[in-house]
Amino acid sequence: MTARLVLREPGHYRLEGAVRFDAPLPDELQSPGIVPVAGRAIVALDGLERADSVVLALLVEWVRRARAEGFRLVVAEVPDRLQALIRVTGLGPILADGP
């Protein structure tokens, strides 16, 4: 399944499908149009079928954009394998901090 960002409810999203180096990244994920509610938006990763470090790069970019737009992006329900990559790369503080 191609990766996609699904709106669960206002301010709550779910990243679904496979995000990896050997698959093209859909345009909607390059500029996802995340809309916050009360200064934050949540992106759950429990819908990922397969993910590698390209997901981390994508999340860092989304967090950067959220901060530039003045809201906090919260990454939730991170799969174990991705948690390990976050620890190894030291990206935990970047993905956890808000504006």
Image: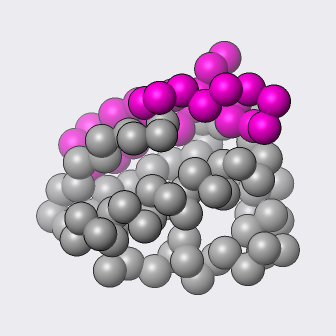
**Does the image show residue 71?**
no
Residue at 82% from the left image edge and 54% from the top image edge: 81
Q: Position of residue 31 (x, y in %)?
A: 39, 41
Q: Which residues are magenta?
A: 1-28
Q: Position of residue 58 (x, y in %)?
A: 57, 51
Residue 57 drawn above or below residue 95: above
Side of 72 where 82 appears, left or right = right
The part of the image, by quadrant, that contains residue 39 is: bottom left
Nearer the observer, 84 or 33:
33
The part of the image, by quadrant, that contains residue 64 is: bottom left
Residue at 24% from the left image edge and 65% from the top image edge: 69
Colour scheme in use: one colour
Residue 64 drawn above or below residue 4: below
In the image, residue 39 lies in the stretch drawn in magenta = no
Residue 62 drawn above or below residue 92: above
Q: Position of residue 48 (x, y in %)?
A: 66, 36
Side of 83 where 9 appears, left or right = left
In the image, residue 7 lies in the stretch drawn in magenta = yes
**Does the image show residue 65?**
yes
Residue lying farthest to the left in this orientation: 38
The part of the image, by quadrant, that contains residue 57 is: bottom right
Q: Position of residue 54 (x, y in %)?
A: 71, 48
* Quadrant of the drawing holding the C terminus: bottom left
Side of 45 where 38 appears, left or right = left
Residue at 30% from the left image edge and 41% from the top image edge: 33
